[in-house]
Image (spheres, rainbow, N blue to C red):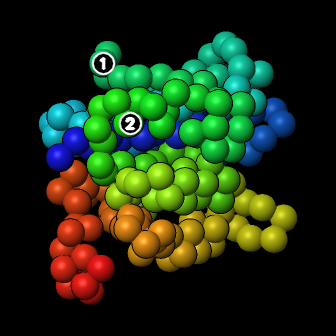
Amino acid sequence: MNQALLVIDAQQDLIEGNEGEQAVFQKERLIENINRVIQKATEAGAHLVFIRDKDVGGGEGDGFQVHRDIHVPDNSAMYDKLATNSFYGTPLLSFFKDKKVEHVVIMGCQTEYCIDTAVRYATVNGFDVTLVADAHSTKDSPVLKAEQIIKHHNNALDGHYNVDHFSDVRQSDEELFQPKHDFYREKYGM
């Protein structure tokens, strides 16, 4: 099975914050878990794709780059986006189709925006998705704390499906590149 790891907006200024923005919730844990999953993806022979948001750091400089403590393997694809949707205006969907990817593991920032959108869009476009529960993060909003937002999305997106394809939410210490989608299909007659 062809698989991919999609790391969304794990950028320096977004994770660390800056003079105008707060840091994401549990940033040290986030970076540690992202690196753990990157290692697993490399060992599994998965395609690695990093997405950078052009709104972060003004689209340039150190703040725009993937966080300095995140290991970016040399063979990774890197795409820049201008929208919340990582697939919009980027070659991401074509890349996945060309590589015959069937399963996408997703992590990064921010939970309620780009992560939520990527999970939903990927399932609609024919991919089984695994969202890494402890490897995506966000900031407090005016109405909810970051921790509440993360827990809500882990719950809402676990089992979120679009008929043929769906998302499974798992922890970073699990065997993420041994997807359980077919097990659920058989168990529930999907």
On screen, residue 51 versus residue 180, left or right, reads right
| Three-letter code for the amino acid on which mark 1 is drawn | Asn
Residue 132 shows in this picture: no
Residue 97 x, y percent position in the rendering: 37, 36
Residue 38 x, y percent position in the rendering: 30, 37
Residue position marked by numbered label 1 in the rendering? 75
Where 177 sits versus 94, above or below?
below
Q: At 68% across and 44% down in the image, what residue appears?
A: 84
Structural crowding at the residue carrying mark 1, measured as other residues with C-alpha within 10 Å and reported as few (<14), some (14–19) or many (≥20): few
Under circle 1, the secondary element is loop
Which of 97/87 is in front?
97
Which of 51/186 is in front?
186
| Cα–Cα gap, marks 1 and 2 | 15 Å
Residue position marked by numbered label 2 in the rendering? 96
Residue 81 x, y percent position in the rendering: 64, 30
The reply to whether callout 1 and callout 2 are in contact (CB within 8 Å) is no
The C terminus, quarter of image: bottom left
Which badge, 1 or 2, comes first in the chain's sequence? 1
Query: Farthest residue in the top direction?
Result: 61
Structural crowding at the residue carrying mark 2, measured as other residues with C-alpha within 10 Å and reported as few (<14), some (14–19) or many (≥20): some
| Three-letter code for the amino acid on which mark 2 is drawn | Phe
Please identify, in this view, whether the residue under mark 1 or under mark 2 is nearer the observer.
2
Q: At 56% across and 69% down in the image, what residue appears?
A: 153
Under circle 2, the secondary element is helix
Residue 6 shows in this picture: yes
Where 57 sits versus 131, above or below?
above
